[in-house]
Image (spheres, rainbow, N blue to C red):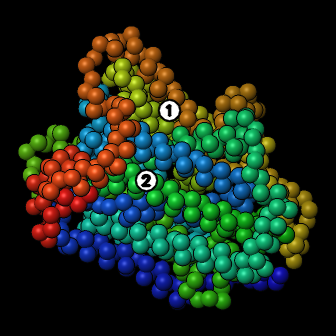
């Protein structure tokens, strides 16, 4: 065990690696702008022409889920609160099943571009507008945090220029989104997943080498109480327990995977429903791999700094900077590798931001422009989509400037998703699962759910929960070879988690604050969803919800589940026919019929009959 010496700095090679990543991303955008005849229609631009296959889409779903918030936030989360975070592995499984079996079948059979189109089909225009506006607001806010967060953390540790990085990320992203549309977004994501895995791997391998093997790291973690997997405390006020993560986490992430435009848009762009479901299930493996990597990085962080915590010793000013600090500490002898890690964090940012920009463009064109300007041609809609990409790119960079005023990252990002995503998911669940829900119930439910989750969310930002609710684990600085007195140690270890501008200090705690506002941040989404569902059901019943005639396509039916097994039947049918029957040819995507598919592929291959 060598004593950590002074940490390294960024050298030319690191900048080269980082710039290389940006250049390749931009190049992919240019390629898809011209490949295959470019972006002829808005459907090409926003949906990749609905010809994507499962694997790239799965990798892309994984990439955009894993922003720099994951790369920098999760390891420091594990370092401070222990490996209970890995219970999310179960959560992801439930989330993927819910998305693939409840939401996907309905969205896919309707052949929609924007998930909010569904709200109009099922309820009415007003509900659709509410959903759209909420989504746009949520995504721009979140994207701002995603751009700004890594830039700040990396800037303070590596001296990487802050606003240079923010603007570069924003511009490159906007560039390839505008030129290449969804295809470019998906393929750059595939490339970026590679970079992320490489960045993580370099840290894990080198940490294992320096600390003397993986067993040492696990032993240190065990002795430091970091392997706290099983905390079955049912108290919903505890920040992370088995139940908060399984129940709260499932609601929070389902609102992202099941109904969030940026994710739905991708799996709907697959060429058949089977491919779409497959992409979700493959993506589950990706999520698990990334979770394992980031939890392991957190344990490596603890093993390295168990006697001298850089955060308490004031070497870094926020927990999000621990990961870059570790990288410069252990990889300083390998020029280019710290750059690879920075590229890894920024790949996370790029993939999330690009999917947000593409989704925002899709929603704006489909929900705010198409319904009101019906005369526009496909060509001009394609141009408008590209214009919207530029506008939203600029807006997100602007939001990043605002985000510089907000508090701790991971929590802020997730609570925004919880506050807005929860009620929206409740709204979709109401439409898909409750046949007698009507538009009045939907609107009142959405308002109620939104009000409740804003109340608890904003309350929790202003009066953060007490340390005994969040259970930070012990951090030591005894091993630091510097003169710190003991009193200093105590005051800094007890630091509350949210350091927000809006915080009010030294206030008399009321029961409201200690119970309602101390709710685990993962439950914000759950509260929003359940309130929306309940109120929606209660309002729909007396307002004539049972009398309406519903098209069965708008709700989840038994057939939707049973059709999972059609894949076995199809194989036999194909064998017995000499020529394929028309309904058989990969055409369960309603956006296309058989003939159109055969001719729209420039290469003259008949795409329609490939299953």
Left or right, 594 with reference to 348: left
Q: Residue furthest front?
A: 576
Left or right, 205 with reference to 104: right
Q: Measure how far apart labels 1 and 2 are at the Cα level.
A: 22 Å
Tell me the tag on residue 529. Answer: 1
Identify the residue at image location x=34%, y=14%.
546
Identify the residue at image location x=79%, y=43%.
468
Q: Which of marks 1 and 2 is in front?
A: 2
Left or right, 193 with reference to 288: left
Residue 119 in the image, given as x and y percentages of width and height: 31, 33
Residue 186 in the image, given as x and y percentages of width and height: 35, 64
Question: Is 410 or 170 nearer to us in this picture?
Answer: 410
Instruction: Examine the rendering and report whether any part of residue 554 can be seen.
Output: yes
Residue 176 in the image, given as x and y percentages of width and height: 31, 69
Q: Mark 2 points at which residue?
A: 280
Q: How crowded is mark 1: few (under 14 residues within 10 Å), some or many (20 or more)?
A: many
Which quarter shows the N terminus? bottom right
Question: Is 344 or 594 nearer to us in this picture?
Answer: 594
Identify the residue at image location x=52%, y=71%.
196
Q: Residue furthest right?
A: 486
**In what element is the residue under mark 1?**
helix
* Quadrant in the rendering for residue 269: bottom left
Question: Is 243 or 31 nearer to us in this picture?
Answer: 243
- Asked if 141 appears above or below 159 in the picture, the reply is above
């Amino acid at each position: 065990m060598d004593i950590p010496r002074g940490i390294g700095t960024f050298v030319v090679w690191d900048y080269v690696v980082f710039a290389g990543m940006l250049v390749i991303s931009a190049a992919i955008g240019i390629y898809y702008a011209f490949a295959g005849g470019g972006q002829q229609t808005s459907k090409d631009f926003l949906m990749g022409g609905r010809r994507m296959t499962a694997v790239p889409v799965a990798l892309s779903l994984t990439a955009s889920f894993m922003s720099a918030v994951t790369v920098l936030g999760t390891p420091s989360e594990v370092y401070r609160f222990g490996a209970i975070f890995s219970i999310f592995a179960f959560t992801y499984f439930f989330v993927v099943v819910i998305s693939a079996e409840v939401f996907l079948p309905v969205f896919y059979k309707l052949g929609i571009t924007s998930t909010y189109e569904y709200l109009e089909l099922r309820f009415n225009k007003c509900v659709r507008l509410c959903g759209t506006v909420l989504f746009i607001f949520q995504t721009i806010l979140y994207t701002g945090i995603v751009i700004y967060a890594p830039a700040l953390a990396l800037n303070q540790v590596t001296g990487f220029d802050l606003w240079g990085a923010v603007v570069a990320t924003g511009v490159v992203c906007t560039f390839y989104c505008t030129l290449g549309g969804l295809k470019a977004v998906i393929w750059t994501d595939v490339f970026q997943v590679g970079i992320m895995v490489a960045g993580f791997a370099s840290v894990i391998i080198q940490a294992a080498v320096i600390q003397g093997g993986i067993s040492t790291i696990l032993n240190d973690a065990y002795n430091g109480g970091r392997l706290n997997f099983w905390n079955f405390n049912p108290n919903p006020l505890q920040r992370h327990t088995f139940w908060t993560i399984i129940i709260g986490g499932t609601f929070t992430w389902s609102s992202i995977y099941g109904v969030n435009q940026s994710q739905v848009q991708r799996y709907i762009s697959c060429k058949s429903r089977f491919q779409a479901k497959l992409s979700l299930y493959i993506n589950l493996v990706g999520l698990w791999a990334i979770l394992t990597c980031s939890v392991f990085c957190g344990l490596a962080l603890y093993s390295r700094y168990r006697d001298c915590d850089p955060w308490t010793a004031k070497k870094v000013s926020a927990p999000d900077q621990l990961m870059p600090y570790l990288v410069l500490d252990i990889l300083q002898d390998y020029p280019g590798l710290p750059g690879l890690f920075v590229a890894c964090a920024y790949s996370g940012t790029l993939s999330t931001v690009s999917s947000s920009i593409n989704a925002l463009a899709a929603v704006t064109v489909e929900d705010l422009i198409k319904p009101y300007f019906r005369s526009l041609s496909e060509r001009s809609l394609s141009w408008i989509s590209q214009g919207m990409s530029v506008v939203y790119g600029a807006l997100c960079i602007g939001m990043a400037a605002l985000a510089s005023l907000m508090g701790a990252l991971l929590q802020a990002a997730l609570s925004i998703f919880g506050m807005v995503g929860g009620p929206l998911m409740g709204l979709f669940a109401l439409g898909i699962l409750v046949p007698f829900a009507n538009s009045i119930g939907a609107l009142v439910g959405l308002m109620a759910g939104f009000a409740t989750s804003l109340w608890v969310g904003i309350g929790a930002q202003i009066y953060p929960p007490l340390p005994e609710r969040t259970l930070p684990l012990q951090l030591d600085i005894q091993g630091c070879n510097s003169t710190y007195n003991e009193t200093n140690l105590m005051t800094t270890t007890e630091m509350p988690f949210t350091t927000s501008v809006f915080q009010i200090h030294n206030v008399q705690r009321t029961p409201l604050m200690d119970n309602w506002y101390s709710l685990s941040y993962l439950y914000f989404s759950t509260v929003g969803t359940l309130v929306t569902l309940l109120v929606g059901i209660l309002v729909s019943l007396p307002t004539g919800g049972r009398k309406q005639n519903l098209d069965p396509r708008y709700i989840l039916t038994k057939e939707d589940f049973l059709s999972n097994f059609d894949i076995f039947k199809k194989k036999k049918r194909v064998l017995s026919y000499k020529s394929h029957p028309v309904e058989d040819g990969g055409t369960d995507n309603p956006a296309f019929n058989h003939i159109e598919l055969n001719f729209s592929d420039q290469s003259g291959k008949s795409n329609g009959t490939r299953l």
